[in-house]
Image: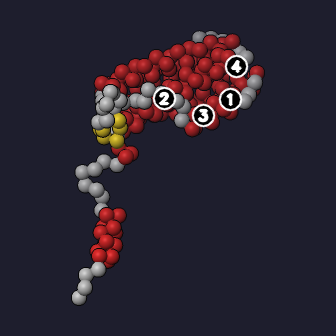
Amino acid sequence: MRFTPLPAIAVAIAVMAVTPAFGQLSSRSLSTYPGPGNATHAPQGPDHDFAMAAAVFAKFSVVSGRLATMEAQDGRLRELAELMAEDYAAALGRLRTVAGTADIALPAAIGPNEMYRTRIAAVRSSKGATFDRAYCLEQTEALREAEAMLQSYAATGANRQLRRWATRTISLVRQHQRSLQQIMTGDGSS
């Protein structure tokens, strides 16, 4: 009986397709830590995912806030948007510091994700009072989502420093929600 390599190759390919590569991390679970000539990798997980989502939210708030400082018709909304842009820029800076202590590398250039870019585009296309209304609605939704994300991590996150950051940022989000609600309802009290 003559041996033909074709069936053996087919079996090997089938086994490789259904057998996980033991000891190897998937590309989804790798993160490159920047540095001169440094290409080391470390596993990513829920802490990294939270830090990235929080950073993307913060950047969205900065970008949309800057847009509103230029486009909003209501002076109170322009002031709040400027404050939010400053507050979330500072929060992003604190997050970078905390993430660094947890060996979580956040990209140097973080921008809004596709969902947030769509929200910014929808608001940007409006003018005057329509812009103000669209900005308020988008911010209300984004703040609601951020509060839920932050509360979840603050309650169950593994990293103590990130939990502290989340708790501190929840207070900031709630303050902005209240201020935004006052503007939307026409309540002039602070």
Q: Is residue 104 visible?
A: no
Q: Is residue 12 visible?
A: yes
| Residue carrying label 3 | 117
| Residue carrying label 4 | 71
Mark 1 and mark 3 residues within 8 Å of each other at the beta carbon: no
Q: Residues within 10 Å of mark 3 (few under 14, many from 20)?
A: some
- The percent position of residue 88, horizontal first and vertical second, equals 50, 20
State the separation of the CA atoms marked 3 and 4: 17 Å
> Relative to 181, is 153 on the left or the right?
left
Residue at 54%, 35% in the rendered image: 113
> Relative to 49, is 19 on the left or the right?
left
Question: Between disc 1 and disc 3, whose residue precedes?
Answer: 3
The amino acid beneath tag 3 is Arg
Question: Between disc 3 and disc 4, whose residue precedes?
Answer: 4
Mark 2 and mark 4 residues within 8 Å of each other at the beta carbon: no
Which secondary structure lies at badge 4?
helix
Which secondary structure lies at badge 1?
helix
| Residue carrying label 2 | 110
